[in-house]
Amino acid sequence: MASMTGSRPAGSDGSDFWHRESIAWQHKQSCINKSRLKFDIVIHSMLSILMFIRLLPCLVAFLGTSSLESIRKWDVPNARPWEYIWFISSLSAYLGWKAMAKNDTILIKQYIIGSVVFGVLPVLYGFVDQGDDFYDYIMNKQQSSKMLGFPAVLIWFMFLAISAQIHGLGLYFSIQLIKAWKPRKKKTK
C-alpha cells in the first residue's frame, strides 16, 4: 500500500505497464493500410465514373437508344477495347471495399487478381496502343483525334498515368493488408 506522506512502492505508478499498452504491429499496419486503400478505392471510383461518362456515347450507340440522341453527338472518339476492359476493374474495387469490413483475405486476393487482370493489363495495353499516336503528337504535333477540343492522346495518357499509379498503390496496400491479417505463427523450439 502507498502511504500519503511516504514514497510509493516500486511499480505502483503505472510505469511497469508500458509494454502492455503498445498496439501490436499487425493492428497498426491494418489500420494505416485500410485507410490508404479506402482512399485509393475512392479515387478509383471517381475515375470509373469519368470512364463511364466517356463510354456513354458508345454504349448508347451500341444499344440503339433513340431517346438519348444528344449523347451520341458528343465530341469524343470511339472507345478503345482496353477502356471497356478497364471499366470492369471497378467491380474489383468493390470487392476490395467489401474485404476491409471483415478483414477478409479471400476477397482482398480477388481484388488483387481483378486489379491485375482488369486494371493493370489494360493500362499496359493502353500505353502500347497509344504509344505511336503520342510519339506523333510530341514530334510533329499531329493528332489523330480530339476529345472535347483537346488532343485525345494527351487525355488518354493522363488517364493511363493516373490509373497506373492508382492500381500500383492499391496492389501495394492490399498486399500489406494480407500480411497484417495473416495469423501469427507460433514459434517452435
Image (cartoon, rainbow, N blue to C red):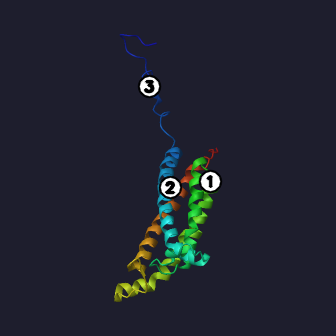
Check disc 3 and report the residue beneath it: 14
Q: Give x and y (percent) for residue 128.
A: 49, 81
Q: Distance between the residues labelled 2 and 1?
A: 14 Å
Residue visible at 43% across and 87% down?
144
Would you call the spot at circle 2 few (<14 residues within 10 Å), some (14-19), or many (20 or more)? many
Q: Write down the residue under mark 2.
A: 37
Count up the numbered dots: 3
Q: In this view, does 89 lie above or below 156?
A: above
Camera-side residue: 81 or 128?
81
The reply, left or right, for residue 157 in relation to residue 139 is right
Label 1 is placed on what type of residue?
Thr
For the residue carrying disc 1, how many other residues have a C-alpha within 10 Å: few (<14), some (14-19), or many (20+)? some
Which circle, 1 or 3, is nearer the viewer?
A: 1
Q: Relative to residue 144, is residue 154 depicted above or below?
A: above
Mark 2 or mark 3: whose residue is earlier in sequence? 3
Give the answer, above or below, for where 79 lies relative to 111: below
Compare marks 1 and 3 and give the one earlier in the sequence: 3
CB contact under 8 Å: marks 2 and 3:
no
**Contact (CB < 8 A) between labels 2 and 1?**
no
**Res 40 visible:** yes
Residue at image coords 35%, 87%: 139
Report the amino acid beneath label 3: Gly
Find residue 72 and report its horizontal and vertical position in percent. 51, 77
The residue carrying mark 1 is 105
Q: Position of residue 11 (x, y in %)?
A: 45, 23
Observer-side mark, 2 or 3, equals 2
What x and y, as percent, mark residue 147? Answer: 42, 78
Amino acid of disc 2: Leu
Q: Is mark 3 on a helix, strand or loop?
A: loop
Which quadrant would the C terminus be assigned to in this image?
A: top right
